[in-house]
Amino acid sequence: EYRIRIFNEASFRGYPVVRHPVLHFPSDEQFMTEDAFSFMLGDSIYIAPIMRCGVVKTKTYIPAGRWIHLWSDSVYDIYGDTGSCVEVQAPLGEPPVFYKQCEELNLVVSKLKQKGIIGLEKTPPKPKRFSLLKK
């Protein structure tokens, strides 16, 4: 399983589980300059968190390769040595997450979707009311 593999890499090779993309894409200068928040989970999952309130659609830089958007199953083929910007939906609770096209992750994602962990129709939570009590 993917988690076991990346934890073994951390234990035996010293690779961090959560990594800066430059570790896997050293020739992609985008990761050396502008992209300060994206990160990798192992070598095959790329996360680009949203750092602004109210964003529901965003342009996200993804590295070269074949990537699948976790929430929509859209496939992005990025050719060459550097990545490209793509526009994806990013409502609250569904940040831009991409995984490499590979059998290992295809199985993991399909199991999570079968169990209803990924792809649930979300209903926004009702706002909670708070009151301050003075003593």
Image: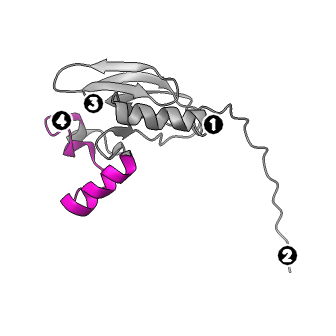
Write the residue at 26% across / 25% down. 65
Query: For the residue marked with disc 2, what is the amino acid?
Result: Lys
Task: Say whether residue 18 is visible.
Answer: no
Which of marks 1 and 2 precedes in the sequence? Answer: 1
**At numbered mark 4, what does the secondary structure look like: helix, strand or loop?**
loop
Disc 2: which residue: 134
Name the side, left or right, on which 132 lies relative to 2. right
Which quarter shows the C terminus? bottom right
Q: CA distance from mark 4 to mark 3?
A: 11 Å
Q: Is 12 above or below relative to 133?
A: above
Disc 1: which residue: 116
In magenta, the rendered stretch is 2-30
Disc 3: which residue: 63
**At numbered mark 2, what does the secondary structure look like: helix, strand or loop?**
loop
Write the residue at 18% across / 34% down. 28
Picture quadrant of residue 34: top left
Crowding at mark 2 (Cα within 10 Å: few <14, some 14-19, many 20+): few
